[in-house]
Image (cartoon, rainbow, N blue to C red):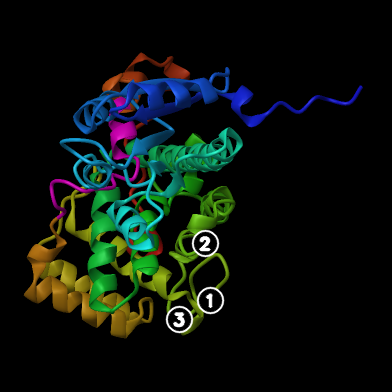
Amino acid sequence: MEQQVLPPYLNGYPYQVLIVDDDPVHRALEREILDSSKYAVSEARSGREALAALRSRSFDCVLLDKQMPGMDGDEVCRRIRGELGLGILPILMVTVSGDIDNLTLSLSAGASDFIRKPYQPSELLARLDAAVSHKRRTDQFDSAESMLFALARMVEAKDGNTGDHCSRLSHNGVVLGKALGLGADELMALRRGGVLHDIGKLGIPDSILLKPGQLTDAEWVIMRQHVDIGARLVGGLKSMRLTVPIIRHHHEKWDGSGYPDGLRGEEIPLLARVFQIVDIHDALAHARPYKHAMERQQVIEVLEAEAARGWRDPALTAIFLGIVKNHPEDLNVPLASHDDLGLSLFGEIRSTGALDWDHILESASTQDRLAGPIPIRQSLGETGD
């Protein structure tokens, strides 16, 4: 028997729609048009009621009357986009006006689309379906990204980090990227790469990942596979197109002695070269469970030595060291960011105690208990992790 394909809305909750109109007749008409299990409809009689509703719960779309007393539809749009920060919420402006300039003002205020009164019910449904379907796809996309970011931070937690390492790499990669004049897409890739660079360690056995002491040659072969695993994990998301090279190539070296592909010089993608410099800097400048933080001058000397040895891009290293020497305050992570790259979800998971590795290891049986802290890296230049 052929499997029945269910409509998208039956695979999840009904679409949540907020009708905003001061006229009860119009609200009743729109509610009647949307009277099906496909939609869950809420109403607001004014812009202020609408803003209050949007603060208290999530919606998939807003049907917003343009002409309302007190706060008109354009002002509601501006507040939804600015004050509430709901940049991707679809807002369909309902209006009697056909004036192009007037409608352009609504689009400038943040409306996603508009529909003119009087309208056919089929037209309203078609526009609404397109808007809410796009919103749900975007939500799923955001959820996938947040999950990846949180998983990557969990990998860092196994190394005794609290997530600050990822946040520093994200911030400092952007600092160096801006100094190089990179564009917005490249800067976002560096932000994402700061969190996701080691996500492939999810595929590395804990017996290797958490082994005390140095790894054997055979174990290093397995450990080095984390870059390929990570690139494959993330490669399915189109938004990660520029981040994948960071994940795969951040252990390449300028002289061709790195891995996984032995790339040399400018064969190494630029963003990977940028990232690996801030990665090494962070490993040197901050304490780990197995090492103390180096003083700034020591960090500078090590980075200069690695560039001279042929491990790092000398030009990029010089630019970054200029920041370290002259503007070290630029490398301080701000207290707040509009995009936490999975930090909130990671924090929620940590608050349950599920990532309290010391407690977990103490509770483990003797044969499964790890013998000590994570391995002292064979070379900071080798991993930077």
Residue visible at 18% across and 49% down?
Answer: 287
Q: Where is residue 79 in the image (x, y as percent from the top left)?
A: 21, 43
Query: The C terminus is located in which quarter?
Result: bottom left
**Which of pointers 1 and 2 lies earlier in the amino acid sequence?**
2
Q: Is the residue marked by circle 3 packed among few (<14), some (14-19), or many (20+) residues within 10 Å? A: some
- SS at circle 2: loop
Q: Name the residue under label 2.
A: 241
Magenta stretch bounds: 333-348
Residue 378 visible in the displayed image: no
Q: In this view, does 257 lie to the left or right of 72?
A: right
Q: Magenta segment, principal secondary structure?
A: loop
| 336 w.r.t. 55: above or below | below
Residue 345 is a magenta residue: yes
Q: Mark 3 points at which residue?
A: 255
For marks 1 and 2, give the one nearer the viewer: 2
Tell me the amino acid under the disc marked 2.
Arg
Q: Is the residue marked by circle 2 packed among few (<14), some (14-19), or many (20+) residues within 10 Å? A: some
